[in-house]
Image: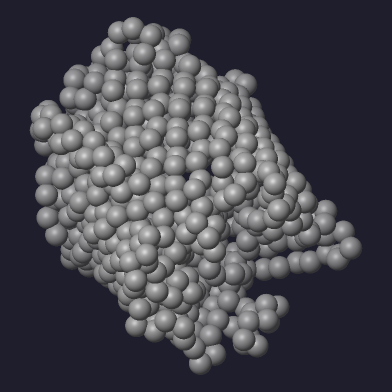
Amino acid sequence: MKKHSRIAVRWILLAALAACLAPDPLYAAAPLGVATFAQAPTIDGDVGDAEWVGAAVVDQNFVQIEPEYGAASPFRTIVRVAQTGTAFYVAIEAFDPDIARLASAITQRDAISPRDANNVQAALDDAIAVMLDPFGDERTAYVFRTNALGTQEDARIVDNGRAVDFQWDGVWRSAAMRHEDRWTVEFEIPFSTLIYAAGMDRVWKTNFVRTVPRRLETAVWSGPSESVFRVSGFGDLTGLNLPGQSADVWQFIPYTIASYETGKGARTEFGGDIRWRPSSNLGADFTFNPDFALVDADVEVINLTRFEVQVPEKRPFFLEGTEMFNQRYRQFHSRRMGDITWGTKANGKLGGTDFSVIAASEDLRLTPVANEKAAYYGIVRAQQGLWRGSNIGFLAANRTLGDDNAGSVGFDTTMYFTETLSFNGQFFRVHGPTADGGAAWYVRPSYDTSTTHFHVRWGHFGRGIRNDFNVLGFLQDDDRKEFDTNFSHIFFFNTGPLERVRPVVNFNRYTSFNDGVLRGWALAPAVAAVLRNGLEFEIARRDEFRLFERKYRNDQMTYTAGWNSRDGRSVSAYVGNGTNFGNDLLLYGGEARWAFGDAWRLSYNLTRLELSPDLRGESTTIHVFETSYSFSPDLFVRGFVQTNSAIDKQNIQLLGVWRFNPPFGMFQIAYQRGTSAFGQTSSQGDTLFTKLAWVL
């Protein structure tokens, strides 16, 4: 295997070097001055000339990131910007000579962007995004995105685009309108939604993004950078006159929830959130008795490894505003906390330093852990800006349980040397009763463009650190010295049946930290192709060695085929076979997603795993069915059903939502059966919930 490993690494290095030598075309957008309006324009989607007279105007074809990097988009786009004393305004006209093919199917908030990490900068509908960096630090920014139906999506960018938090929700308005030759959209973004520095004649950074799914096109006003989220590629927005926010701006959001479960009777609970903005650049949130009963269920997945699966967080308190905590090796993984009785968060920006602090308490009276009544958690995070969007960060995480403290303290950094060459690394020290003083680190230089990625990574992880680290963090394994490298490239084709081809190869090898014994390696090449008629194909191979109680050689070959209309309809199927930890493996399944008009969406996912001889009883069938119907962006119903035969799990969730004061004031009614937590068997009986939350 050593010979094969050396050959694989050499080919990856040669391919990456060839890609690195390709020149990157750059486009620098001219600064855009902001006019001040005495009267705010009407936000109705109709970009009338009269109400936008005097606004700064950009009239051009944006620059493509995909599919033709650096080339002008074939679509004309007109942008107008202005401000009043309370808000920032944008009007955009998106011309389209083939308006009948406009994709506009999504009505669910925060669902325009796919959550595929390899494709997150795209959009599932034709969409327009406004991105704002109020401090001009080239590291953090806000995203406000909408489609031709006026559906809203917002997010927070941190670490110069390395992390994007789509769970952030701001208060803003938008409206869209469809015409014969274009579609138009208007945005109103209140300054109170943003963290910013007050003052006269301020300069922000901004970018405007247009996506056209039928061409796989992503185009920007300023750029192109290798990603639409690369804040250091934004253009200047000048002449902003920004009001200071009055002190003691409070927002109280109480809630009441009533439930009835068969066999257990009725319950009524009360709780609430307090949001405080002492200034334009500081904010704090406090929650007491938070309600997690109506959180979306965890989707069951197949785990073919012997390592823990990282289950994503879905509880609102832990989702919003925690984008700063995204690390490769997460020192703070909020799923380690159970149901908290109270929690508080503070975040803001002081000079060039971003900070966030979290404190919470978990009631353990129903969980027999060390016979303690409560666990207390504290997390502190800070990031100091450097150059070109680079930063260095600090994070400390601790759990106090009786007399024991456990967690980690560490530093991490991301450095951008050019638009394409970057470096990131992390070091942390673990404290706790089992591995006090243990440490870990990694370094990872990388090369990234819109079409190419290459990195190498080296890491050391001390023996026995995982238990104390995972009290609040997420680390799958320890006792390893690790090397990892990955190369991928996207080839676009302007003519012929092929539209895009993406080969990728990853190699990973690790040995024991102390004695150098080989513990594992994996080689995983794959190639995916997208045809102009919507057909998609992928072939993937994985070969690996693992040392546990004995040596294992695992392998798997997977074939995938599908079709994507790029208007909300897609189907795919896959089949894979090989060996896995001494078992013969057969894995197959499929997925279908379908949009019926602008309001109704369905999806179904099937996964079937067959192992032989399967002495541990891991063969399973997983069904996941989801549906939603939107009467408007703020009035909708959803359904979710999933089963997992291996653990005899059946989970049903039906939910109706009316956001009468979006995004926080809402009424919900729900039915739930079965446990929604990942990997747990069904135990909850038929339960009906009603919840009312309002804003004071």
Looking at this view, name the residue that lies furthest to the right: 263
Coloration mode: one colour
Count of picture labels: 0
537 or 593, which lies in front? 537
Q: Position of residue 418 (x, y in %)?
A: 11, 45
Against 429, residue 215 (above or below) is above
Q: Quadrant of residue 392?
A: bottom left
Q: Is residue 188 above or below residue 483?
A: above
User: Residue 610 lies in what quarter of the image?
Assistant: top right
Residue at 21%, 33% (x, y): give it: 15
**Rendered residue at 17%/41% (across/down):** 420
360 vs 652, nearest the viewer:
652
Q: Quadrant of the C terminus?
A: bottom right
Q: Position of residue 94 (x, y in %)?
A: 32, 20
Residue at left 15%, top 41%?
419
* Location of residue 247 (image quadrant): bottom left
Rendering coords of residue 85 (x, y %): 27, 48
**Residue 312 image point, x, y percent:** 52, 54
